[in-house]
Amino acid sequence: MDTPENSTPCSYENFWQNEAEKLPWFKPWHTVLDWQPPHARWFVGGEINASYACLDIHIHGELKDKTALVWCDETGVERHLTYSDLYKLVNRIADALKQKGVKKGDVVAIFMPLIPEAVAAMLAVARLGAIHCVIFSGFGADALRDRIRDVKATLIITADAGRRRGKCIPLKETLDRALELDSMVKTVVVVKSTGYAVSMHEGRDIYFDDFLAQASSYCAPEAVESHHPLFILHTSGSTGAPKGVVHATGGYLTYVYSTLKEAFGITKDDVYWCTADIGWITGHSYLVYAPLMHGATVMLYEGSHDYPTDVAWWQIIERFKVTIFYTAPTALRLFMKQGVDDIARHNLSSLRVLGSVGEPLNPQVWEWYARVVGGGRDPLRCPIIDTWWQTETGGFMIAPKVLRDHDAVKPGSVMHPLSGIEADIVSSDGLPVEPGSKGFLVIKKPWPGMLVGIWGDNERYKRTYWSRFTGMFDTSDCAIKDRDGCFWILGRSDEVIKISAHRIGTAEIETAVLSQGAVAESAAIGVDDSLRGQTIVLFVVLRAGIAISDSLKKEIIERVHKSLGRFIVITDLFCVDRLPKTRSGKILRRVLRALVQREPLGDLTTLEDGAVIEDICAQYKQFEK
Ligand code: WT7
């Protein structure tokens, strides 16, 4: 296999060509890579279909009756769908969508809990060559509306409600609110998942069962050109509205297929559990597409890690004999706090690979994960694979390779770039830094999983990823490369906040805060939190004549939750007279962050008015008491 050290100029293309050949193409490509910076097209001229690659290839062979999806909820109820069951369901949904007029290139929005129908809906949309846009079911009505509008979806698949901690989380109700002012949506398909009461809009809404009633059991997969978009997934940037990251079909499928094999060594015999939701990229790449292409059994758990008891997750691993477990450090930190006795009582010996993603996995947590969950067994048998990547990269970029690195992994490091990937650390002027020095993490060559654009905004694509460093992809992360070439991720270099591994922009939070009429200005600050990675502290300036009160504070926080979702944890809200700003009017959030975290305030020369800091300090200290 190629490594950056021994690559000849085009060897990474050869590597990706070999990987792509493992997928079922309808028509071969004529060019591996057409690279017109900053736009890459992979496997040009090749034709493929994502749902075919995940399902059709298995259903005529030995995997036909093998479980594709095992779903389980908090009460222990379980459902099993074989590859052939999933295939039938996907075909029926695809045919029903086709009867509604959905065709290649149309966008279908999906706002669903983690149930088998959600996975089937994604694959059905892909079967038609249409583009899915999954919107995380934890989002509030405003966040949902913005995303639906951005992609101009006319059909949405949803469910009555999701299940969490013994409660129903209404989804159809949230969607109704999001659609109140919208006329573009013509059809809403509603899965009855929990039985939660919903109101149906005559002429627009239809129950899933009725939608499928006339559908045929076969719907031919549409062969699409490799560069054809497979999905749009919104993610947060430092400024403005969320970006609709677009991934194309052929390159993306090749990439997620290849990386899951290389990092986790997945096989069809694995019972694979990725605890992410389908609303995030991890859910797309490593809960749906890659494991199904590999013919694995995929575990879906609809619920929270600590309900009905603290050991819910360990029970699942024992009961379903999970072999690969992939989760986020934030969950591991919560478990660490609970102690080990309850975990030790479970038989976790089926596990053979432990993965992590979303935030830095610090050495203490790494060690705990290996010892308590990995059972302190031979590290060769149960390696920890910490995967660094982003929504934009489509799949793992830097991670230990299960078959190569397991004995040399340094706890806390994501180790080396995977095959075919060239990553580096550069200074602000784009020059490589000395080993051991902090710098900006960049990717120096295109890779097949690279996003192909931001939906409807090519300028933003160029500006966001390709303007800071010439010819290099800007990840917006800071990192260190040590003398052995091992990478250590430090975190974001922009205003993106990561709460429990979920990504949210300061701009989105501030917009939601401002929708509370009493607030004139606001700044959302991400502060370090030992459990969640980061949480939010809000600074607000109220309109003249309005005084802060506990009830107003509650209202502001409730506004953010309703608008964006309850996963946004706000730990404090401070009311001040002014915010620190630069002469050009940009809020200096880093100064506020330093203040809250009791760190040195740093360079204050760009401040428009130095006195503002003293005022804020005085007000802040007063609140802190
Ligand atoms: C950001 C991307 C990739 C799927 C989940 C998050 C941070 C991601 C790691 C890791 C340290 C990590 C980075 C990155 N991140 N993985 N293993 N170690 N930090 O996707 O929401 O697009 O967030 O998550 O800061 O830029 P995302």
Image (cartoon, rainbow, N blue to C red):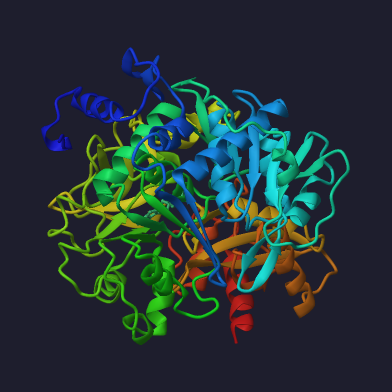
- Left or right of 18 in this view: 135: right
Any part of residue 591 in sight:
yes
Task: Tell me: residue 321, above or below residue 5.
Answer: below
Question: Horizontal and vertical percent for residue 530?
Answer: 43, 74
Q: Residue at x 40, y 19 (%)?
A: 26
Question: Horizontal and vertical percent for residue 520?
Answer: 76, 59
Q: Residue at x 61, y 47 (%)?
A: 135
**Observer-nearest residue: 571 or 253?**
253
Question: Horizontal and vertical percent for residue 106?
Answer: 64, 27
Residue 205, by quadrant, is top right
Report the quarter where the C terminus lies. Answer: bottom right
- Left or right of 234 in this view: 517: right
Task: Tell me: residue 365, above or below residue 247.
Answer: below
Q: How many marks?
A: 0
**Observer-nearest residue: 109 or 330?**
109
Residue 171, by quadrant, is bottom right
Task: Tell me: residue 560, above or below residue 531.
Answer: above
**Observer-nearest residue: 330 or 351?**
351
Task: Tell me: residue 471, above or below residue 309.
Answer: above
Question: Horizontal and vertical percent for residue 151?
Answer: 66, 34
Q: Residue at x 16, y 37 (%)?
A: 3
Report the quarter where the N terminus lies. Answer: top left
Any part of residue 236 in sight:
no
**Observer-nearest residue: 117 or 275?**
117
